Image (spheres, helix red, strand yellow):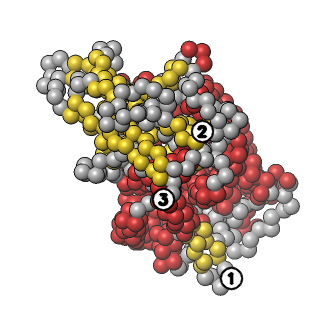
Amino acid sequence: KDSTIELFVNRLDSVESVLPYEYTAFDFCYDESEKRPSENLGQVLFGERIEPSPYKFSFKKNMECQSVCPKSYNTEKAEDKAKLEFLKKGMLLNYQHHWIVDNMPVTWCYDVEDNQKFCNPGFPIGCYVTDTGRAKDACVVNADFNDKDTFYIFNHVDITIFYHVVENEAAGARLVAAKLEPKSYKHTNWEKPDCTGPPMSLGNKFSGEIKIPYTYSVKFVEDKTIRWASRWDYILESMPHTNIQWFSIMNSLVIVLFLSGMVAMIMLRTLHKDIARYNQMDSVEDAQEEFGWKLVHGDVFRPPRKGMLLSVFLGSGTQIFIMTFVTLFFACLGFLSPANRGALMTCAVVLWVLLGTPAGYVAARYYKSFGGEKWKTNVLLTAFLCPGWVNEEINNSFELKVVFADFFVMNLILWGEGSSAAMPFGTLVAILALWFCISVPLTFIGAYFGFKKSGIEHPVRTNQIPRQIPEQSFYTKPLPGIVMGGILPFGCIFIQLFFILNSIWSHQMYYMFGFLFLVFIILLITCSEATILLCYFHLCAEDYHWQWRSFLTSGFTAVYFLVYAIHYFFSKLQIKNDRSCGTRFWLYHPLLSNLDLLCVFASRYNWILCLLLVCHQDLQCGQSGLNESSLI
């Protein structure tokens, strides 16, 4: 009953800048005596920096206008002037506080249009009134914020803690909500503040000395209507575009299911008709008059060009596919909800590290089936290439351009800006240790078992002389087919992409993992059907180079993802005149839209299905196919 309630502060972020900053970067009041709570790997990677705060209060003990600390600045001193300018920049870009009580965000709830209430899991540092008198951002909430070219600092907060009494338990009571209202007061006596008077203003061209006192009030309210298990609901229900998201997702799923059914019906009917016709042939002469995929059955298992690179991508795709599926499955079950801070990223990283064995096994198995002999190079590339690009030269040397360099450059920029999104050196070393000490050895173990097993046996013998490929029509050429193949898969995920990008760059909470998992399954089905259908058309056109096409067809979704990210940057984000912010965005999104994210895991799955399709077709050819291959 008399327990102390701890209030923690997190990083500050803004929709007008993609650079988050630690709480102490803005020279707010902080408690040096308290020990900083430990953070998991996911929180560090997401840039969260949780620290203890000087805001102290006890359960059911209301307090009015309590002083926290005063901050004094003198513009004649370079250090104080730099701190004050940074604080002004934070208010100009509408940086938001993020406070935490009992692992719940302290929300700022206010009325919006149509008499609805919106609860924001953060509140601004302050606001700015332009030199023309236009109130920006939070300055619209108070008519007293009317001085031109002036900043107003929210140096006071009214905190309300909601709780309900728990019967038949020793705990006594549980906190079910935490809300606050930011205010601005120019306290005349900061030692004994009364929280009255005009707002705390700071002219844009102010010079001299200024003192900013920080205060707070807290009260406790019993609320029996909110259950502890559903205490996050009032935050999630007020998230923007929630109703639109439900309607859009359902509409997208209906469209995708309808199109998937059409693709599956066309594919199955056409393939069944061809197989039935080929099974009714009575002589070799009839076979010679036929055309289509049966004529290339002796060439479809010819090793692809750059088989080393393809096998490495297939192995890396296996690793990322399993990681994505398991992570989304656990998130769908609620184990990785927003209440478990950093759990989503931690789960993904740990799974990626531990799944090196299947990556090495699949890459080695397919490389051996392609007739490759450079097993050492294959294992090393599987372990170190993903994410990355490889260019194979004429002399069979490999130039490895690891995307880790991209990440390292981005981290250097964030370090230079003093952003909390910069990964600490210790965490960077830990990530490298996980990669080199766990993932790489597991990849070698998987490759050992993969090379130890015999290669995949093909159902028919490959012709010694490659068959000449006839001239192709426009839609069966490689590039048009690949470009068309990524349209349908992208159509079923672009709505979710909008909300995912909002959660990353606009700092909105993403919680609909059930729909995300369902869209992921629909994405796999759509990618598979589109890839198999186009692969079948290419084989009917007597083009037996299906391996890379089946890999890149659905993988081209990554290119559409990058194009959508460009559209999102220019149409949705409000980044203002900050080159480092734009640099972080443009370094980060090619990393996401790389072959490593969409192309690899989806295309590996589709490549195997195309392999099964080709094997099934050749098994249907039977002995007549072997006789025909001898004639060719």
* Type of amino acid at the residue the image marks with label 1: Ile
Q: Position of residue 472 (x, y in %)?
A: 84, 58
At label 2, counting other C-alpha atoms closer than 10 Å, the crowd grade (few under 14, some 14-19, many 20 or more) is many
Q: Is residue 77 above or below residue 330?
A: below
Q: Specify the quadrant that holds the N terminus.
A: top left
Residue 148 in the image: above or below residue 437: above
The residue at 50%/23% (across/down) is: 110
Residue 47, horizontal then vertical, whole percent:
44, 52
- Closer to the chain start, of discs 1 and 3, is 3
Residue 65's image quarter?
top left
Where does the image place residue 211, in percent across and percent down from the top left? Answer: 43, 44
> Relative to residue 419, is residue 275 depicted above or below?
above
Q: Is residue 409 above or below residue 291?
A: below
Residue of label 1: 394
Q: Is residue 300 left or right of residue 378?
A: right
Q: Residue 150: which numbered mark, if any?
A: 2
Seen from the viewer's position, the closer of residues 246 and 531 is 246
Compared across the picture, whether 354 is left or right of 321 comes to left
Q: CA distance from mark 1 to mark 2?
A: 65 Å
Q: Residue at x 54, y 41 (%)?
A: 202
Q: Is residue 48 left or right of residue 278?
A: left
Q: Residue at x 57, y 29 (%)?
A: 145
Amino acid carrying label 3: it is Lys
Residue 145 visible here: yes
Label 1, secondary structure: give it.
Answer: loop
Residue most toward the bottom? 395
Mark 1–mark 3 Cα distance, whole angstroms, equals 63 Å
Who is closer to the viewer here, 534 or 81?
81
